[in-house]
């Protein structure tokens, strides 16, 4: 990952209401949502500071009204922040003129929202080619680019269907293909799968992970579903009342929740599905008597737990160069799988 973040937010606030700016200055950034509410203001985002690196997927999650969509809208400047600074690839987003902003959105940003917003009178192919034509691409070129996208999201054979002839999951794929056709560097997705039934949703998550494996986009993904966040994220930001309560890797959030609110989210999570072997390994010592089995530090515990538990001795943990970087004891795996959760009655 490159050193300069692709997205950087520095003390970003979004407060709705007539006196928002004045009140914010009066309290020097120490915002109490209740006090502001009594004065007729609603706090959407409260002092958000973070960075997103190139190729990283940051999932922002929280319950309805937590401020996650408002934060995304500030970063894409669909909404103007009340205070703070937002940088996109080092460019000060809030200082851009309208024309520069349109240019940035057109060439750098892709957006996918919960509602598919497909044009009903256009076919799948025409829907995907549409933003390219707006950019001035020749019809012929835009159609061939759109066809590439159709293949990428697995809709071959349906390119001449109209939206009404597609299932919800297929419509969502068209939305994803349309936003990818522009080849955005930064991809904003606001609850893109929440309208889908659970089975299609899981398929879409798989598809999305596959696409990200190929395309390596810088992504901000909004969801209210903790399981979805754990599945997709490089890092997760958990929001409540406009405040980012914790921003960390899924493993660290599950192992070390920073607040009571975050702990509530994590208490039911099966740890073995989230944590990598690296999270439970111990340092290796010279006199260690190890089993013949070796496991990678990067595998999810669940995928190797059975093998480790069938060993009597500790198991060597290796990195990508096959170098032993630690050991994992069967007892540690048992504790992680069974000891970390509340006992079910």
Image: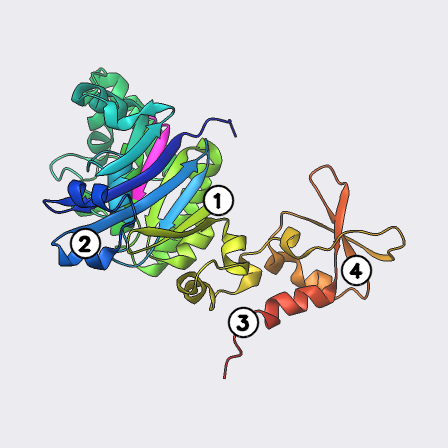
Q: Name the residue under label 4.
A: 314
Q: Nearer the viewer, residue 259 or 112?
A: 259
Disc 4 vs disc 1: Cβ atoms closer than 8 Å?
A: no
Q: Mark 2 points at which residue?
A: 36
Which marked residue is nearer to the observer: mark 2 or mark 1? 2
Q: Is residue 37 left or right of residue 177?
A: left
- The Cα atoms of the two marked residues, 2 and 1, are separated by 34 Å
Above or below for 214 versus 201: above
Residue 158 in sight from this viewpoint: no
In the rendered structure, which disc, 3 or 2, sits on the residue that comes first in sequence? 2
Above or below for 165 versus 311: above
- The Cα atoms of the two marked residues, 3 and 2, are separated by 38 Å
Q: Is residue 10 left or right of residue 70?
A: right
Residue at the (65%, 69%) spot, across then down: 335
Q: Mark 1 points at which residue?
A: 234
Which marked residue is nearer to the observer: mark 3 or mark 2? 2
- The Cα atoms of the two marked residues, 4 and 3, are separated by 24 Å
Numbered range of the magenta stretch: 183-189
In the rendered structure, which disc, 4 or 3, sits on the residue that comes first in sequence? 4
- Picture quadrant of residue 38: bottom left
User: Residue 314 in the image: x percent, y percent?
Assistant: 79, 60
Please check the rendered image and state whether residue 185 is part of the magenta-colored stretch, yes or no: yes
- The Cα atoms of the two marked residues, 4 and 1, are separated by 29 Å
């Amino acid at each position: 990952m490159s050193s300069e973040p692709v997205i950087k937010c520095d003390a970003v606030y979004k407060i709705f209401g007539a006196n928002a700016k004045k009140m914010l200055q009066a309290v020097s950034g120490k915002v109490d949502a209740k006090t502001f509410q009594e004065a007729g203001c609603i706090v959407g985002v409260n002092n958000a500071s973070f960075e997103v690196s190139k190729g990283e997927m940051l999932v922002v999650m929280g319950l309805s009204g937590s401020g996650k969509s408002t934060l995304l809208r500030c970063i894409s400047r669909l909404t103007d922040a009340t205070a703070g600074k937002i940088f996109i690839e080092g460019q000060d987003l809030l200082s851009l003129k309208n024309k520069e902003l349109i240019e940035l959105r057109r060439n750098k940003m892709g957006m996918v929202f919960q509602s598919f917003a497909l044009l009903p009178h256009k076919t799948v192919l025409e829907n995907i080619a549409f933003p390219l034509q707006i950019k001035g691409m020749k019809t012929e070129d835009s159609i061939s680019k759109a066809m590439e996208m159709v293949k990428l999201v697995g809709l071959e054979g349906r390119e001449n269907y109209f939206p009404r002839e597609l299932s919800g999951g297929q419509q969502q794929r068209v939305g994803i293909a349309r936003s990818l056709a522009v080849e955005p560097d930064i991809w904003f997705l606001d609850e893109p799968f929440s309208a889908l039934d659970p089975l299609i949703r899981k398929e879409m998550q798989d598809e999305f992970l596959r696409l990200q494996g190929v395309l390596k986009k810088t992504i901000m993904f909004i969801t209210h579903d903790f399981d979805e966040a754990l599945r997709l994220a490089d890092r997760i930001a958990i929001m409540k009342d406009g405040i980012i309560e914790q921003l960390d890797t899924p493993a660290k959030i599950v192992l070390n929740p920073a607040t009571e609110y975050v702990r509530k989210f994590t208490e039911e999570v099966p740890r073995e599905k989230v944590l990598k072997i690296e999270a439970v390994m111990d340092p290796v010592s010279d006199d260690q008597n190890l089993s013949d089995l070796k496991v990678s530090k990067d595998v999810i515990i669940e995928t190797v737990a059975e093998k480790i538990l069938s060993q009597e001795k500790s198991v060597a943990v290796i990195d990508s160069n096959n170098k032993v970087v630690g050991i994992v004891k069967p007892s540690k795996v048992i504790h992680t799988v069974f000891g970390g959760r509340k006992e079910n009655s």
